[in-house]
Image (spheres, rainbow, N blue to C red):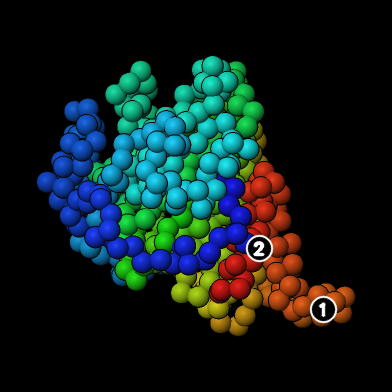
């Protein structure tokens, strides 16, 4: 996420009402039909195979039922969601070429400053389109490819895109995966060649600005043998009094002895349905690291899945969720062990306040082939009042006698003694609560670069203040 300094921003920036009559943009009508999908495909200049893929995904979407494994989403009416909103500019490679109104939005979020100070490359998406994309010359000279996915589809990496696109998340997986396959737009394509280490992170930032719209970006990352990458994604949206939808897709391929750290901090508004799907495939001796912070959104389904296919593959998931008033956040992580001597570790934290509901689901699956597998799950939940709710739902399936699996869960409230102790040292009650919550979240923040950790702590403080 961008180097956002929350204290320096007028909070009304996140809550303004967007007047469509004041903006020069193109918006495909609400709902979903074959005509709409074909219109999106035409707008995107899809190759023929992608057009056919979209239409097949639409057929699957129309046949599948809404998933029943998360909180209810009855308030989401796809007939009222615009699946494509095009801004009034094409993608730019220089920041000064971006139109002033869009540039102003991203400057308030700190995108240009973050690019200058801490990033190897940046992509910025506004509604359904990438409006800015740039990678530092020294990174490009290493052979690293970082571009928008639509350009990759028709360029040098077209066949690679075709080989990998929605293979980890097929449209048949669930209804919103099929929806994504039909109407996806925007997103990033990253390829890191064999043996290349990208010393500083790449970042994509997604801003859904239009009222009553959906955002369906697709991120495809391939880290080749022995390569190393840290990729950061951030998300935000202004607040509206109607539903918005985020149904993006992330597919991560970590080749033999490679390493990928994927960090995301989502700061959606509380009218957002966040129904995102994320998957990683990890090969022999490779390492996958998930760092996740989920703030905002009305309802979330978010369960990153990792397939440890290669022998000695390893994955770690570290995440935090904050559910405030009116929020029902259903999150978790899934580890599937296939290769021998694979290992995984899940460390999850959730906070609920002002009646917020936080549900954490962990799933560990050990295949018969995964002899010597080791898996550990640690879940901690903190409720800040009597109105809030927190649940932990673990699932473990072991199909071999040679595995070591453990699960630990703790649910509790802030100790009155801890608050009293801090107050006796001259700290106000509000500051004491914030300090305790920040300490509870430290396993996540310490895994982020310094500027992003500071940002996450600021977001926690704002959630504490606003509920």
Q: Is residue 464 left or right of residue 61?
A: right
Q: Is residue 20 visible?
A: yes
Q: Is residue 397 left or right of residue 174?
A: right
Q: Secondary structure at mark 1?
A: helix
Quarter holding residue 148:
top left
On the image, the x and y values in percent for residue 255 come to 53, 25
Q: Is residue 419 visible?
A: no
Q: Is residue 40 left or right of residue 341?
A: left
Q: Which residue is mark 2?
A: 380
Quarter holding residue 50:
top left
Q: Label 1 to label 2, Cα distance in Å?
A: 25 Å
Q: Residues within 10 Å of mark 1 (few under 14, many from 20)?
A: some
On the image, the x and y values in percent for residue 72 come to 36, 68
Outermost residue, bottom direction?
386
Q: Quadrant of the C terminus?
A: bottom right
Q: Secondary structure at mark 2?
A: strand
On the image, the x and y values in percent for residue 203 come to 52, 39
Q: Nearer the viewer, mark 1 or mark 2?
A: 1
Outermost residue, right direction?
425
Q: Which residue is mark 1?
A: 423
Q: Nearer the viewer, residue 99 or 56?
A: 99
On the image, the x and y values in percent for residue 177 come to 33, 47
Outermost residue, left direction?
35
- Residue visible at 29% across and 24% down in the picture: 154
Q: Nearer the viewer, residue 195 or 367?
A: 195
Q: Residues within 10 Å of mark 2 (few under 14, many from 20)?
A: many
- Residue visible at 47% across and 31% down in the picture: 134
């Amino acid at each position: 996420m961008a180097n956002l300094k929350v204290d320096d921003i007028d909070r009304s920036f996140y809550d303004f009402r967007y007047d469509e009559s004041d903006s020069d943009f193109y918006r495909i009508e609400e709902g979903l039909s074959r005509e709409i999908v074909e219109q999106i495909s035409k707008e995107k200049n899809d190759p023929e195979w992608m057009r056919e893929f979209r239409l097949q995904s639409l057929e699957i979407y129309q046949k599948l039922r809404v998933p029943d494994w998360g909180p209810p989403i009855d308030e989401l009416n796809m007939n009222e969601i615009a699946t494509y909103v095009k801004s009034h500019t094409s993608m730019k490679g220089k920041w000064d070429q971006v139109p002033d109104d869009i540039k102003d939005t991203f400057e308030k979020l700190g995108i240009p400053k973050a690019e200058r100070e801490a990033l190897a490359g940046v992509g910025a998406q506004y509604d359904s389109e990438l409006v800015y994309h740039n990678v530092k010359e020294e990174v490009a000279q290493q052979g690293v490819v970082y571009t928008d996915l639509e350009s990759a589809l028709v360029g040098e990496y077209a066949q690679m895109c075709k080989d990998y696109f929605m293979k980890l998340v097929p449209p048949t997986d669930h209804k919103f995966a099929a929806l994504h396959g039909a109407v996806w737009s925007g997103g990033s394509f990253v390829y890191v060649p064999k043996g290349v280490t990208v010393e500083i992170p790449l970042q994509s930032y997604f801003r859904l600005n239009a009222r009553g719209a959906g955002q369906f970006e697709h991120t495809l990352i391939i880290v080749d043998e022995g390569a190393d990458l840290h990729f950061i994604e951030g998300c935000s949206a202004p607040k509206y009094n109607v539903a918005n939808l985020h149904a993006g897709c992330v597919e991560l391929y970590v080749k033999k002895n490679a390493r990928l750290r994927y960090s995301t901090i989502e700061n959606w508004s509380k009218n957002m349905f966040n129904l995102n799907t994320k998957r990683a495939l990890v090969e022999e001796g490779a390492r996958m690291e998930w760092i996740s912070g989920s703030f905002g959104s009305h309802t979330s389904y978010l369960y990153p899945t990792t397939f440890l296919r290669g022998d000695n593959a390893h994955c770690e998931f570290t995440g935090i969720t904050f559910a405030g008033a009116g929020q029902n956040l259903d999150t978790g992580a899934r580890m599937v062990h296939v290769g021998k001597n694979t290992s995984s570790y899940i460390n999850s934290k959730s906070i609920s306040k002002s009646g917020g509901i936080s549900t954490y689901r962990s799933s560990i699956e050990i295949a018969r082939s995964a002899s010597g597998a080791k898996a550990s799950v640690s879940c901690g939940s903190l409720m800040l009042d009597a109105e809030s709710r927190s649940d932990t739902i673990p699932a473990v399936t072991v199909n071999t006698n040679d595995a070591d699996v453990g699960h630990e869960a703790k649910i509790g409230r802030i100790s009155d003694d801890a608050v009293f102790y801090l107050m006796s040292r001259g700290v106000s009650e509000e500051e004491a609560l914030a300090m305790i919550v920040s300490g509870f979240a430290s396993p996540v923040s310490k895994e982020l670069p310094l500027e992003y950790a500071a940002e996450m702590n600021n977001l926690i403080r704002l959630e504490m203040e606003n509920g």
